Image: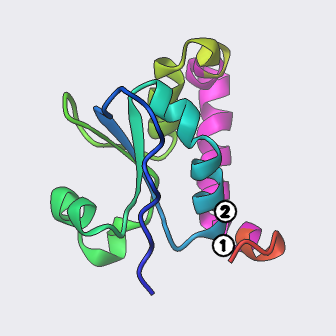
Amino acid sequence: AQAQEPAPAMTSRKPDVWVLYDGHCGFCSRWVRFWARLLAEHGIGIAPLQAAWVRERLALPAERLVDDIRILDSRGPVRSGADAYRFVFRRIPWAWPFDLVSRIPVGRAIFDAAYRWFNRNRFRFSHACRLG
């Protein structure tokens, strides 16, 4: 089954950055859509990693395509994993405390480990929460 692309959030600002998520993960799909309006207000669009234009743009092997959340920014490198979250934190003014905590040495180690653990178990969360 192909992941459906979400309807774009209503905003006058065109995205210059994209959060790319696993459209087959129920938790990921629900979470990113929950934040879609806020992200759009800060020039960030959302799209599933399975979308044809994303697969073409990233040019990753199929087995690596959905191994992490990714940020596609026209002005910089593709970011993935915990670094993707830090990038988004920096774009949203009130999220600065999350950015700060995720960058200090102890906070960074905990944040990165928590992201890796959750990423490995995201389908279990989806199943437990009945999110498909």
Where 74 falls versus 59 (above or below)?
above
Q: Would residue 56 be found to the left or right of residue 54 on screen?
A: left
Looking at the rendered structure, the kind of residue marked 2 is: Phe
Mark 1 neighbour class, 10 Å CA radius: few under 14, some 14 to 19, many 20 or more = some
Residue 56 screen position, x and y as percent: 17, 64
The crowd level at tag 2 (other Cα within 10 Å; few <14, some 14-19, many 20+) is many
Is residue 121 inside the magenta stretch? yes
| Left or right: residue 113 compared with residue 12 | right
**Going by the image, does 94 lie left or right of 43?**
right
Quadrant location of the C terminus? bottom right
- Residue furthest toward the bottom? 1
Q: Earlier in the sequence, mark 2 or mark 1?
A: 2
Q: Is residue 88 magenta?
A: no
Task: Residue 29: give its label.
Answer: none
Q: Which residues are magenta?
A: 99-125
Under mark 1, the amino acid is: Phe
Q: Residue at x 26, y 60 (%)?
A: 54
From mark 2 to mark 1, how far is it between C-alphas?
7 Å
Instruction: Give the farthest residue toward the right.
Output: 128
Return the residue nearer the eye: 108 or 50. Answer: 50
Q: Quadrant of residue 36?
A: top right
The quarter of the picture where the N terminus appears is: bottom left
The reply to whether dot 2 and dot 1 touch (C-beta < 8 Å) is yes
Front position among marks 2 and 1? 2
Q: Which residue is mark 2?
A: 27
**Percent of width and height locating residue 20:** 40, 52
Q: Mark 1 highlights which residue?
A: 123
